[in-house]
Image (spheres, rainbow, N blue to C red):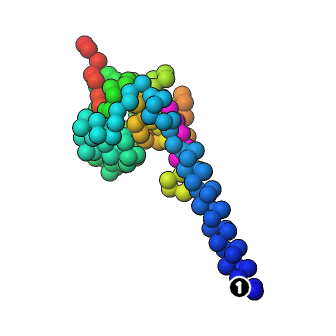
Amino acid sequence: MTDQLQTRRTLLAWLGAGAAASALAACGTPASAASYKVNLTDAQWRKKLTKDQYFILREAGTEPAFSSPLLNEHRKGTFLCAGCDNALFDSKTMFHSGTGWPSFYQPLPGAVGTSSDFKLGYPRVEVHCADCGGHLGHVFKDGPKPTGLRYCMDGDGLKFRAAKA
């Protein structure tokens, strides 16, 4: 009898953990595609984006550290969403974080949204494009003044538009 109770308790505990994990994962999902200004089908996104851009923006992937050419972008200009051309960051807010990903201390007003991400088993703040919902990276509280934030972005989710001289 004790073995049956223990087995039943273990089963209930696992079911409860699964339900909690599902609820947490749902909390980390950005708003539905219908709530964004730019709405494309999966087939349209695949046609529009490169394989690497699709992996980052639509599958919330991460590029290898130090692989983005944007790490060495030092001109004045604007960093845009590679999926929809939404202006995300002014180059004045970019800084060298040493992490291997383009980092900024502040996005442009209304350019990004955030959600909770539990994919690694602990909470992180995911950053997505406010216009298309594309995954851009994460924000951490270890950045420079004036905000103290580090928007750690995947370069494959971005493109750069130089300022006109």
Viewer-proximal residue, 2 or 163?
2
> On the picture, is 68 further left or further right than 125?
left
> On the picture, is 83 further left or further right than 117?
left
118 shown above or below 69: below
Residue 72 position in % (x across, y down)? 28, 36
- Could you tell me if residue 40 is visible in this image? yes
**Which residue is painted at 55% across and 50% down in the image?**
25
**Which residue is painted at 49% across and 21% down in the image?**
109
Callout 1 amino acid:
Asp
> On the picture, is 116 further left or further right than 72?
right
Residue 116 position in % (x across, y down)? 55, 43
For the stretch drawn in magenta, the main secondary structure is strand
Residue 66 position in % (x across, y down)? 31, 47
105 shown above or below 78: below
Residue 144 position in % (x across, y down)? 50, 34
**Which residue is painted at 62% across and 67% down in the image?**
14
132 shown above or below 21: above
Q: Which residue is mark 1?
A: 3
Range of the magenta residues? 113-117
Q: Is 126 part of what is drawn in magenta?
A: no
- Number of numbered markers: 1
Q: Quadrant of the C terminus?
A: top left
How packed is label 1: few (under 14 Cα within 10 Å), some, or many (20 or more)? few
- Could you tell me if residue 156 is visible in this image? no
